[in-house]
Amino acid sequence: MNQRIIARIASSTLTLAAAVAAVAPGATAATTSQVAYDNFNTVPKTVNGHRDESTLSAPSMFLPFGGVVEVAATSNRVIGTLATQVDNFVCEHGDRLTDTCLTANPKTKAMAYGLEARIYGAGPQGEPVGSPVATSTETFKLTYRPSTNPSCPATSQLPGHPNKGFGVNCDIGGVLETVTFRHFTPSVAMPAKAVVEITNAPTDPPATTVIIGVGTQTAYKGWSPEPLLEGGTFLTEPPRNGGVPAIGHDPNPTEAISEGILVGEYTGLQPVFKVNLVS
Protein backbone atom coordinates (compact mmCIF):
# COMPACT_ATOMS: atom_id res chain seq x y z
CA MET A 1 0.00 0.00 0.00
CA ASN A 2 1.52 3.33 -0.98
CA GLN A 3 1.97 6.29 1.37
CA ARG A 4 -0.86 8.33 -0.25
CA ILE A 5 -3.46 5.59 0.41
CA ILE A 6 -2.22 5.14 3.98
CA ALA A 7 -2.54 8.89 4.59
CA ARG A 8 -6.11 8.92 3.18
CA ILE A 9 -7.14 5.99 5.41
CA ALA A 10 -5.65 7.68 8.49
CA SER A 11 -7.41 10.94 7.66
CA SER A 12 -10.76 9.19 7.19
CA THR A 13 -10.34 7.31 10.49
CA LEU A 14 -9.73 10.55 12.44
CA THR A 15 -12.74 12.22 10.80
CA LEU A 16 -14.98 9.27 11.67
CA ALA A 17 -13.70 9.21 15.27
CA ALA A 18 -14.47 12.91 15.64
CA ALA A 19 -17.97 12.43 14.24
CA VAL A 20 -18.66 9.52 16.60
CA ALA A 21 -17.44 11.54 19.60
CA ALA A 22 -19.72 14.43 18.63
CA VAL A 23 -22.82 12.24 18.83
CA ALA A 24 -21.66 9.77 21.50
CA PRO A 25 -24.44 8.89 23.97
CA GLY A 26 -24.12 10.72 27.27
CA ALA A 27 -21.84 13.42 25.91
CA THR A 28 -22.61 16.74 27.62
CA ALA A 29 -21.37 20.27 27.46
CA ALA A 30 -19.17 21.63 30.25
CA THR A 31 -21.10 22.55 33.41
CA THR A 32 -21.58 26.26 33.91
CA SER A 33 -22.16 27.98 37.23
CA GLN A 34 -23.96 31.21 38.07
CA VAL A 35 -24.46 33.01 41.39
CA ALA A 36 -28.19 33.36 41.99
CA TYR A 37 -28.14 34.67 45.58
CA ASP A 38 -25.40 36.39 47.54
CA ASN A 39 -25.64 38.50 50.69
CA PHE A 40 -21.99 38.12 51.74
CA ASN A 41 -21.66 41.77 50.73
CA THR A 42 -23.62 42.71 53.85
CA VAL A 43 -21.04 41.29 56.30
CA PRO A 44 -18.78 43.97 57.88
CA LYS A 45 -15.19 43.73 56.68
CA THR A 46 -13.73 45.63 59.62
CA VAL A 47 -14.70 46.07 63.25
CA ASN A 48 -13.15 48.73 65.49
CA GLY A 49 -10.77 49.44 62.61
CA HIS A 50 -9.54 45.84 62.49
CA ARG A 51 -10.40 42.80 60.38
CA ASP A 52 -13.75 41.22 61.23
CA GLU A 53 -13.02 37.91 62.98
CA SER A 54 -16.35 37.13 64.63
CA THR A 55 -20.06 37.59 64.16
CA LEU A 56 -23.33 37.31 66.01
CA SER A 57 -24.32 33.77 65.25
CA ALA A 58 -27.13 31.36 66.00
CA PRO A 59 -25.60 28.89 68.50
CA SER A 60 -25.65 25.13 68.13
CA MET A 61 -28.64 24.59 70.39
CA PHE A 62 -30.75 26.89 68.15
CA LEU A 63 -30.16 24.84 65.00
CA PRO A 64 -31.65 24.34 62.44
CA PHE A 65 -31.12 28.00 61.60
CA GLY A 66 -31.67 29.76 58.31
CA GLY A 67 -33.92 31.99 56.31
CA VAL A 68 -35.79 32.56 53.09
CA VAL A 69 -34.01 33.60 49.89
CA GLU A 70 -35.32 34.63 46.50
CA VAL A 71 -32.86 33.80 43.75
CA ALA A 72 -32.14 35.98 40.73
CA ALA A 73 -33.25 34.82 37.29
CA THR A 74 -30.40 32.90 35.65
CA SER A 75 -30.08 30.51 32.71
CA ASN A 76 -29.05 27.82 35.21
CA ARG A 77 -31.56 26.29 37.62
CA VAL A 78 -30.00 23.19 39.28
CA ILE A 79 -28.67 23.54 42.84
CA GLY A 80 -24.88 23.54 42.69
CA THR A 81 -23.15 24.87 45.81
CA LEU A 82 -24.12 26.78 48.93
CA ALA A 83 -21.64 28.82 50.97
CA THR A 84 -22.36 30.11 54.46
CA GLN A 85 -20.42 31.37 57.46
CA VAL A 86 -20.00 29.77 60.86
CA ASP A 87 -18.41 30.69 64.17
CA ASN A 88 -16.27 28.01 65.81
CA PHE A 89 -16.26 28.32 69.62
CA VAL A 90 -14.01 25.31 70.26
CA CYS A 91 -10.45 25.83 71.52
CA GLU A 92 -7.67 23.34 70.87
CA HIS A 93 -7.12 23.22 74.64
CA GLY A 94 -9.07 24.74 77.50
CA ASP A 95 -12.30 26.72 77.44
CA ARG A 96 -13.18 30.24 76.31
CA LEU A 97 -15.47 30.92 79.29
CA THR A 98 -12.70 30.38 81.85
CA ASP A 99 -9.96 32.24 79.95
CA THR A 100 -8.05 29.00 79.48
CA CYS A 101 -8.46 28.86 75.70
CA LEU A 102 -5.16 27.86 74.11
CA THR A 103 -4.66 27.14 70.41
CA ALA A 104 -1.10 26.58 69.24
CA ASN A 105 -1.67 27.45 65.58
CA PRO A 106 -5.13 28.90 64.89
CA LYS A 107 -4.49 28.87 61.12
CA THR A 108 -4.31 25.07 61.03
CA LYS A 109 -7.62 23.49 59.98
CA ALA A 110 -7.57 20.64 62.46
CA MET A 111 -11.11 20.29 63.79
CA ALA A 112 -13.59 18.12 61.88
CA TYR A 113 -17.27 19.03 62.21
CA GLY A 114 -20.32 17.75 60.35
CA LEU A 115 -23.07 20.06 59.09
CA GLU A 116 -26.10 19.63 56.88
CA ALA A 117 -27.67 22.16 54.51
CA ARG A 118 -31.35 21.75 53.67
CA ILE A 119 -33.26 23.55 50.92
CA TYR A 120 -37.07 23.72 51.02
CA GLY A 121 -39.76 25.39 49.02
CA ALA A 122 -41.04 28.49 50.85
CA GLY A 123 -44.61 29.06 51.97
CA PRO A 124 -46.55 32.35 51.87
CA GLN A 125 -44.90 33.68 55.04
CA GLY A 126 -41.45 32.31 54.23
CA GLU A 127 -41.88 29.11 56.22
CA PRO A 128 -40.38 25.81 54.98
CA VAL A 129 -42.89 23.65 53.13
CA GLY A 130 -42.89 19.85 53.22
CA SER A 131 -39.67 17.87 53.00
CA PRO A 132 -36.39 19.32 51.72
CA VAL A 133 -36.08 19.36 47.94
CA ALA A 134 -32.32 18.76 48.35
CA THR A 135 -29.76 18.30 51.13
CA SER A 136 -26.00 18.23 51.46
CA THR A 137 -24.23 16.69 54.47
CA GLU A 138 -20.51 17.34 54.72
CA THR A 139 -17.67 17.27 57.21
CA PHE A 140 -15.60 20.45 57.28
CA LYS A 141 -12.10 21.06 58.56
CA LEU A 142 -12.31 24.15 60.76
CA THR A 143 -9.74 26.24 62.55
CA TYR A 144 -9.90 26.31 66.33
CA ARG A 145 -10.82 29.49 68.18
CA PRO A 146 -7.61 31.46 68.85
CA SER A 147 -6.09 31.63 72.32
CA THR A 148 -7.39 34.06 74.92
CA ASN A 149 -5.78 37.48 74.60
CA PRO A 150 -4.69 38.30 78.18
CA SER A 151 -4.51 42.03 77.39
CA CYS A 152 -8.26 42.18 76.68
CA PRO A 153 -10.67 43.51 79.32
CA ALA A 154 -12.69 41.01 81.34
CA THR A 155 -16.13 41.43 79.78
CA SER A 156 -18.30 38.65 81.18
CA GLN A 157 -20.95 36.97 79.09
CA LEU A 158 -22.19 35.10 82.13
CA PRO A 159 -21.76 35.77 85.85
CA GLY A 160 -18.45 34.38 87.07
CA HIS A 161 -16.93 34.00 83.60
CA PRO A 162 -14.35 36.72 82.83
CA ASN A 163 -13.87 35.71 79.18
CA LYS A 164 -11.31 38.22 77.88
CA GLY A 165 -11.82 37.26 74.25
CA PHE A 166 -9.31 36.77 71.43
CA GLY A 167 -7.58 38.87 68.80
CA VAL A 168 -7.22 42.64 68.55
CA ASN A 169 -11.00 43.07 68.72
CA CYS A 170 -11.19 41.00 71.94
CA ASP A 171 -13.95 38.90 70.40
CA ILE A 172 -15.65 36.82 73.07
CA GLY A 173 -17.49 34.54 70.63
CA GLY A 174 -16.25 32.09 68.04
CA VAL A 175 -13.86 32.60 65.15
CA LEU A 176 -15.48 33.31 61.79
CA GLU A 177 -15.05 30.93 58.87
CA THR A 178 -16.70 30.29 55.49
CA VAL A 179 -17.80 26.78 54.52
CA THR A 180 -19.20 25.53 51.21
CA PHE A 181 -21.61 22.63 50.66
CA ARG A 182 -20.81 21.00 47.30
CA HIS A 183 -22.80 17.75 47.11
CA PHE A 184 -26.55 18.30 47.00
CA THR A 185 -28.86 15.35 46.38
CA PRO A 186 -31.01 14.86 44.53
CA SER A 187 -29.95 17.02 41.58
CA VAL A 188 -32.96 19.31 41.29
CA ALA A 189 -33.93 22.84 40.35
CA MET A 190 -33.68 25.55 42.99
CA PRO A 191 -37.09 26.93 43.98
CA ALA A 192 -37.36 30.59 42.97
CA LYS A 193 -38.26 31.33 46.60
CA ALA A 194 -36.62 28.90 49.00
CA VAL A 195 -35.87 28.33 52.66
CA VAL A 196 -32.25 27.47 53.41
CA GLU A 197 -31.42 25.83 56.75
CA ILE A 198 -28.13 24.84 58.35
CA THR A 199 -28.02 22.24 61.11
CA ASN A 200 -25.80 19.61 62.70
CA ALA A 201 -25.07 16.52 60.65
CA PRO A 202 -27.64 13.76 61.27
CA THR A 203 -24.95 11.54 62.79
CA ASP A 204 -24.13 14.12 65.46
CA PRO A 205 -26.16 14.36 68.69
CA PRO A 206 -28.09 17.61 69.24
CA ALA A 207 -25.80 20.20 70.80
CA THR A 208 -26.65 21.49 74.27
CA THR A 209 -23.71 23.91 74.39
CA VAL A 210 -22.30 26.38 71.90
CA ILE A 211 -19.99 24.54 69.52
CA ILE A 212 -20.70 26.03 66.11
CA GLY A 213 -22.80 29.12 65.41
CA VAL A 214 -24.33 29.90 62.01
CA GLY A 215 -23.19 33.40 61.07
CA THR A 216 -25.40 36.41 60.47
CA GLN A 217 -24.85 39.82 58.87
CA THR A 218 -24.04 41.62 62.11
CA ALA A 219 -20.52 41.47 63.58
CA TYR A 220 -19.52 41.37 67.23
CA LYS A 221 -18.01 44.70 68.34
CA GLY A 222 -17.95 44.61 72.12
CA TRP A 223 -19.83 43.92 75.31
CA SER A 224 -21.62 46.18 77.75
CA PRO A 225 -20.30 46.05 81.34
CA GLU A 226 -23.07 43.85 82.75
CA PRO A 227 -23.19 40.06 82.19
CA LEU A 228 -25.83 38.78 79.80
CA LEU A 229 -28.08 37.42 82.55
CA GLU A 230 -27.95 40.77 84.34
CA GLY A 231 -29.09 42.94 81.46
CA GLY A 232 -25.88 43.08 79.46
CA THR A 233 -26.01 43.41 75.69
CA PHE A 234 -23.79 42.94 72.66
CA LEU A 235 -22.30 45.98 70.99
CA THR A 236 -22.50 45.40 67.26
CA GLU A 237 -21.18 46.44 63.87
CA PRO A 238 -24.32 46.59 61.67
CA PRO A 239 -24.64 45.03 58.22
CA ARG A 240 -23.08 46.78 55.25
CA ASN A 241 -25.11 48.06 52.29
CA GLY A 242 -28.26 48.27 54.36
CA GLY A 243 -28.39 44.48 54.55
CA VAL A 244 -29.48 44.26 50.90
CA PRO A 245 -28.10 41.23 48.99
CA ALA A 246 -25.78 41.92 46.07
CA ILE A 247 -27.57 39.25 44.03
CA GLY A 248 -31.10 38.01 44.56
CA HIS A 249 -33.63 39.29 47.07
CA ASP A 250 -34.36 38.85 50.78
CA PRO A 251 -38.17 38.76 51.01
CA ASN A 252 -38.21 38.38 54.83
CA PRO A 253 -35.53 40.74 56.21
CA THR A 254 -37.11 40.80 59.69
CA GLU A 255 -37.55 37.04 60.20
CA ALA A 256 -35.41 33.90 60.28
CA ILE A 257 -35.80 30.18 60.87
CA SER A 258 -34.66 29.19 64.37
CA GLU A 259 -34.97 25.59 65.58
CA GLY A 260 -36.94 24.99 62.39
CA ILE A 261 -39.56 27.64 63.25
CA LEU A 262 -40.14 31.01 61.56
CA VAL A 263 -39.58 33.76 64.12
CA GLY A 264 -39.32 37.56 64.03
CA GLU A 265 -36.91 40.17 65.42
CA TYR A 266 -34.08 39.26 63.04
CA THR A 267 -33.62 42.61 61.34
CA GLY A 268 -29.92 42.92 60.52
CA LEU A 269 -29.37 39.35 61.66
CA GLN A 270 -30.16 37.46 58.48
CA PRO A 271 -28.09 34.32 57.82
CA VAL A 272 -25.39 34.71 55.20
CA PHE A 273 -25.64 32.58 52.05
CA LYS A 274 -24.18 32.40 48.55
CA VAL A 275 -26.07 30.11 46.17
CA ASN A 276 -24.56 28.86 42.90
CA LEU A 277 -26.76 27.23 40.28
CA VAL A 278 -25.47 24.97 37.53
CA SER A 279 -26.72 23.90 34.12
Image: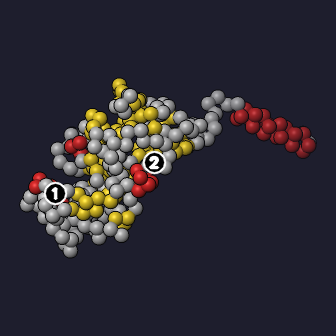
Q: In which quarter of the image is residue 149?
A: bottom left
Please report the residue visible at 28 percent of the width from the left and 43 percent of the height from the top.
Answer: 265
Between residues 193 and 18, which one lies in front from this camera angle? Answer: 193
**Is residue 224 shown left or right of residue 116?**
left
Tell me which numbered mark, 1 or 2, is placed earlier along the sequence. Answer: 1
Q: Residue 91 carries which label?
A: none
Please report the residue visible at 78 percent of the width from the left and 39 percent of the height from the top.
Answer: 14
Q: In which quarter of the image is residue 176?
A: bottom left
Disc 2 is placed on an element classified as loop
Amino acid marked by disc 1? Gly
Which x, y percent locates residue 191? 46, 32
Q: In this view, does 90 lie above or below 133?
A: below
Task: Farthest residue to the left: give it.
Answer: 160
Amino acid marked by disc 2? Pro
Whether residue 38 appears in this view of the structure is: yes
Please report the residue visible at 91 percent of the width from the left and 43 percent of the height from the top.
Answer: 4
Residue wearing tag 2: 245
Which x, y percent locates residue 138? 36, 43
